[in-house]
Amino acid sequence: MHHVHLESTDSTQTYLKQNLEALRTIEQNVLVSTSKQMAGYGRSDNEWEFLENALAFSFTLEPNEELTLTSLEIGVLLTKFFKSYDSLELLLKWPNDLLSPEQAKVGGILCTYKDPKTILVGVGINVGKMNIDKNKFPYPVASLSEDLILKEEDYMEMPRAIYDYILANRIRKNALKEQWDKVCIHLHQEVRIVDGANETKGIFRGIDHDGSALLDVDGKMTKVITGSLFMN
């Protein structure tokens, strides 16, 4: 692994994209972490605000056997890492949000296709104590633990430990659906998925072989490929 840690940067994902070829002359597996991210972003270029006691990092990863399962696989592996790290409970909202058991957002995953052997993965996650006004956000936000305060070295060492864990514990596509369902916060609940002008409402029954959402819409199983999921 080639690990670059930056005291501050606009975006670890942007830094990785812009410097990938040079970084890969040293090692194929590349990790970029930072102590402070100034202009992070998520899906659809939505802004991701970097908070105190939060982690922001990006890395290269070989895609899952089923390319579109990659972000869901990473989500499952993150839940496993934090469970083993300090018994911290992390749950998943389709397709790539990280939530607390109280349904508040603690982070997200961003995957960018580079080439058939490379996905660029960005992770932002609120790990410890949040000294903020939570009412300023348009949705509930939380951290994994209000008791945790990150040390300076944690901003470098925790992303490295997470990346090591992901590389060592890849999940085959045939095993992923069952494992993902176990940490899905809205399984068998009524949801709506909005994709532009289209909206689909139904009971979430899990994911298909390619990671698409499967909704029971009036007794008919409906597949939704992309969109933003909202819980009722």
Image (cartoon, rainbow, N blue to C red):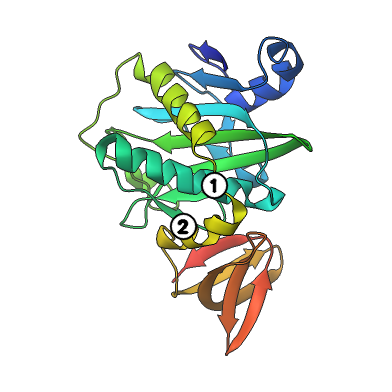
Taking the image as shown, residue 106 lies to the left or right of residue 221, namely left
Screen quadrant of the C terminus: bottom left
Can you identify the residue that label 1 sits on? 171
Q: Which mark is residue 141?
A: none
Amino acid under disc 1: Ile
Quick one: which residue is furthest to the right in this view? Answer: 115
Q: Quadrant of residue 82?
A: top left
How crowded is the residue under tag 1: few (<14 C-alpha within 10 Å), some, or many (20+)?
A: many
Residues at marks 1 and 2, CA–CA distance in whole angstroms: 9 Å
What residue lies at 79% left-to-right and 38% top-to-bottom? 116
Labels 1 & 2 near each other (Cβ < 8 A): yes
Q: Which residue is mark 2?
A: 179
Position of 207 relative to 89 (above/below): below
Circle 1 — which element? loop
Please give the count of numbered marks on the rendered protein. Answer: 2
At x 45%, y 51%, the residue is 138
Q: Position of residue 154 (x, y in %)?
A: 35, 19
